[in-house]
Image: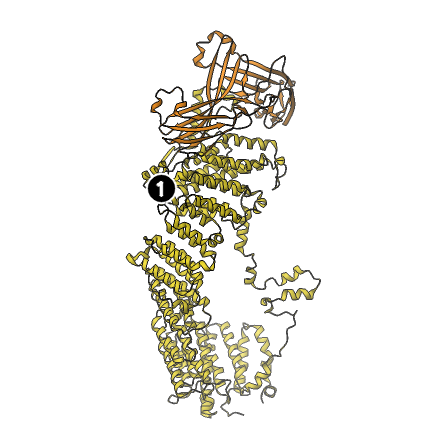
Chain colours: A yellow, B orange
Amino acid sequence: MHSQYQRSRGRNYEAELQRCRPEAALVEFGDYHPLKSIMVTDTKTRRGARKGSTSSSSSSSSSAPLDPLSSMLDGTDPLSMFAAASATETPAMSHSKEKEEEVVGPDFESWSLKRGEILARFTTTEKLSIVSRRDKLFCYSKLKDPGSSAVSEKVRTRLEELDDLEEGSQRELLNLSQQDYANRIEELNQSLKEAWASDQKVKALKIVIQCSKLLSDTSVIQFYPSKFVLITDILDTFGRLVYDRIWTMCSDPRPLPDSFTVDDVNDTAKETCLNWFFKIASIRELLPRLYVEAAILKCNCFLNKCGIQETLPRLTAMIRGIGDPLVAAYTRAYLCRVGMEVAPHLKDSLNRNFFDLLGSFRQISSESVQNQLVLQRVEVPEYLTLYSPAISWILQCIAYRAPEPLLTEMMERCKKLGNNALLLNSVMRAFRPEFVAGRATDFIGMIKDCDEAGFPKHLLFGSLGRSVACADPPESERLTILNEAWKVVTKVRSPQDYINCAEIWVEFTCRHFSKREVNTVLADIIKHMTPDRAFEDAYPQLQSVIRKILTYFHDFSVLFSMERFLPFLDMFQKDSVRVEVCRSIMEVFIKHQVEPTRDPVILNAMLHICKTMHDSVNALTVEDEKRSLALLIIGFIRMVCFGRDFEQQLSFCVEARATFCNLESVMVQLIHTVNQLAMETSRVMRGSHSRKTAAFVRACAAYSFITIPSLSSIFSRLSLYLLSGQVALANQCLSQADAFLKAAVSLLPEVPRSISVEGKLRASESFLLDFINNFLATLLVVPDHPEHGVLYLVRGLLNMIQDYTWEDNSDAKVRVYVSALPLLAAMSQETYLYSIPKVDSNETLYGGDPKFLLEINKLSETLIGQVLDHLKGLGRDEATRRQGALAFSLFGVLLAHGDLRNNKLSQLAVNLWNLSHKHGYCETRVSVSSQPISQKIRKPDMFSLTFTK
Amino acid sequence: MSEMSVTLDIRLKRANKVYHEGEVLAGVILLVCKEAMQHHGISLSMEGLVNLQLSSKSVGVFEAFYNSVKPIQLISSNIEVAKAGKIPGGKTEIPFEFPLNTKGNKVLYETYHGVFVNIQYTLRCDMKRSLLAKDLSRNCEFIVHCQPQKAKVVPTPVKFTITPDTLQNTRERSLLPKFLVRGHLDATNCVISQPLTGEVVVENSDVPIKSIELQLVRVETCGCAEGYARDATEIQNIQIAEGDVCHGLPIPIYMVFPRLFTCPTLETTNFKVEFEVNVVLVLHDDHLITENFPLKLCRI
């Protein structure tokens, strides 16, 4: 037994552990287990098998909350559900959808994609105008009403004029900006819908005719493709309205089946439909007549089975009457588009359109076109590119799932036209990349044969590059292709044209060649883009080059051994872009660099990149940005490993500290890295340091010790001091450990009463209490410093706590005292609960010296005294709830750690028990579980019989 | 005042309102009123008329046979639908039938809306009411198509060539720019329900083409043995080419004959309705070149 001074209960930790260890119980498969709901694996199937006949739906629903993430990836995530919903929502235009889907699949690039591209690409700053001439739209208009046939000619004209006036209040809108123009068109679209909704069908038709007439106006020609898009939107709306109207006329008494035939359509609907066609057939001008009839092409299916089949070739032929080649090309594109939507199986008309286009190709160089270009000051190459969307669209329709021989035939036809560059370009863009890539060498030949005038060759090579970037040409030809292409690309004068083309070819190069070729390409790009700082206008393309390289090169030692890679990065001189590029490189690095590395090439380059990111941080950088940059840099630091060369690793950390000093979380990471390094050293030395490694771990400690003060977050500093102290202790660096812990203690008064957590101001008290408890647990194994007194650190800590300015009305200080009691109890044991190998704790230093124990007891008494004083104070302040809780916690500590055979102590415990229950605030659940024990205290003999050795 | 809310309508059985001689014109009279209503009898009359009008320029000259321009009645019939009484509130449908039979040697010409000649068939429903309420009446035109022609129509293509040399009534032929336009109409004896078709090719032209148009013309003749007035007016003008079209590329000629405004070519003792088509070439210098083709329209 212990001496009389012993107030703490003697403990046999080993035996207690044995007693406390719970019986290992296997969980049966069907049993409840709290973690079971998050067990994923294959429970579903197994369970189903065991349950046998029980309905599978119930078993799957019980295992439904398996894993929220995997269930998201089931293909039924909200986004794809939206997409699916909107796909089925497409308006009634697609009543016979199923039929179409057999012919047109999702691999057909939809018009909606193309549409946006065109609008973005063909823009103008010129002023536009909408001029609607006062011509009669129809050859006859008012005669139809038999009642009015008596009205005189004069009155009739006046009525018509009035009618015209109300439908478009302005006849001539000049000086419109592009946006005004688009808005005006949208207004027309709205008034079309309104007219339709208010049953003014003729007015609706007039609006559509006026709109299509705008398409014969080619002034501000560079805007024409976009104008086409805007106006055909209106035509689409009209087509849909007419179709839906007639469709609903047939849906009485029950809706038409999706695959209806002419026989299902009633006479009234047929007559209405026929009326539309007669009305449209009498539209005076050719272009509106063509467009409007094309817009309601689908309605032919109400009239007869082969209506569409007969109409398409006729409309195709009628387009020949359009003199302006650009207007004609776009009309063909529209007809092909409608044809693909309504009757995709009718390929002949598509081909016919293309052949007619070829047939009238010479129109492009006709005198009237040339005059127009001179008048509008538009260069031929720019003019030719205006055709691209239309021709590409037509070719895309033709090439869609077309048999190889047809494509070959098309190609031959183009060749016959003297390898017209514009056509060739469209062929390369519209035909399957596999087709083009397979004949890449042929295409290069054809591109070479094209006449230089007109269409720029770099555009041709750009289109070819796009094809070979996603489909592979024959292996034997690849190098020749690259050489041939680059020969042309490198000669492009304008940096903008050059980079647009080069950017495309980078992908092909990366896909098929080694770093040597890519390096050459990079060198060439640098050479072209450096003069006059041309790179400043090409950041998006240059970024795309980097992206492509990163897609194909994941081995960073290869990547950084490209000599021109870093110089290439130097072209990104605008801060925001440079950081973005670095960030993208880092993201790929973190994703793909699996093995830690010590490759000096990688390290140098990455340090450079990380430094760039770090240096972008300034006073204005937002917290989120800092955090994400820091995360990327940390990702890099964690990937650096010099293996057994610990000193190298440490000096890397020294360098990194100097480089990344502005990012606090990187600093924190570095300290962790160094601590880890020290522990790793210890592991390698199996705990016994040599002189050299001892010096090294001290160096590690020194690193942490001088780095920690530079952190601004006080809790980071505190916890790192503690952690580093523990590491130092584990490495037998006693004085360093002492210094860390002392530093932590002396930092405590600086802890502010509130700190900012995720942007919100919160009381720091709970964080502080957590830290102190953690700290106390460490103090058990820290041996007293020979030059300072007994329990020097414990006293120091308690003094700091005594002096700290706690929140008013807070029991925090006393709570710390209560939690210090178990430490003191543990310190008085003969054998400590835990210890650090090769470090003598106080148990060995003092060997149970009574003076030491006396010291502990005195300290304990002081603490208990403080607590009791505080309890009294609470009684006075009527804070009985707090009093009860605090009394109970002290009771708990005494019960667990005190030697209750000591009468004074057991009496105190009983008093505390009573105090805690005096006001009935004590949580019954807790107190009930401890009640038997409090009863045992009253019979100390029994108690001692049970609990002492 | 509830009587004001009555509506009277004539609904024909056929959605397209097209009938032939010898057929039965059938339909319903539709009465909709909120409450029961008193009336003094409902009658329905059917009439087919040819209205002839003299153009202002010929009126002076032909005043002498003014009489001959009074309307010609082709068919007329009258029935009492309901005797004076009460019709119940709500929707009332009263069916009717008229056999389209002519008297004597009269023929039901095809419906035609022209300028000087109008052939029109109407149904007229009258409801007589008490003195306080206005009488109600409703007109409804129905369409008569003449009997299909028995003889077979054999299309005879007509080729044409237009050059400065082929032109008539031009004073200064030498001032005209050079051009050569060739083409053909698939037929000039046309079936009215089928489009006029053909092709036109601009082989060459010194001056760019501005437009190529098809002008459909009606030629209406009113008169008799004593004298007559003949007027040609435009029915419709359809553009088939716009701008400087590609030379050597055939451009389709395609025109749908408009309903009501065309009818099978008609020749009677009192009037004639004939049709022509002009292929109109507009050059960029606004020269207008017209090639005329008389058409014979028929129904099969």
Q: Can you say whether A893 is above or below A352 in the image?
A: below
Q: Taking B252 as reference, is A710 above or below it?
A: below
The picture places residue A875, in percent across and down from the top left corner, at 48, 75
- Establish if B192 lies above or below A554: above
Taking the view exactly as shown, the residue that stands out farthest to the left is A532
Left or right: A592, with A178 as reference point: right
Split into 4 quadrants, where in the image is the C terminus of chain A? bottom right
Instruction: Please tell me whether residue A82 is drawn above or below residue A578 in the rendered image.
Output: above
Badge 1 is on which residue? A177
Q: Front-most of A57 and A918? A: A57
Q: Quadrant of the N terminus of chain A?
A: bottom right
Q: Residue at x 60, y 31 (%)?
A: A267
Q: Secondary structure at mark 1?
A: loop
The three-letter code of the residue at mark 1 reads Ser
Residue A217's x, y, as percent? 39, 36
Give the camera-side residue of A661 and A20: A661
- The chain identifier of the residue carrying mark 1 reads A
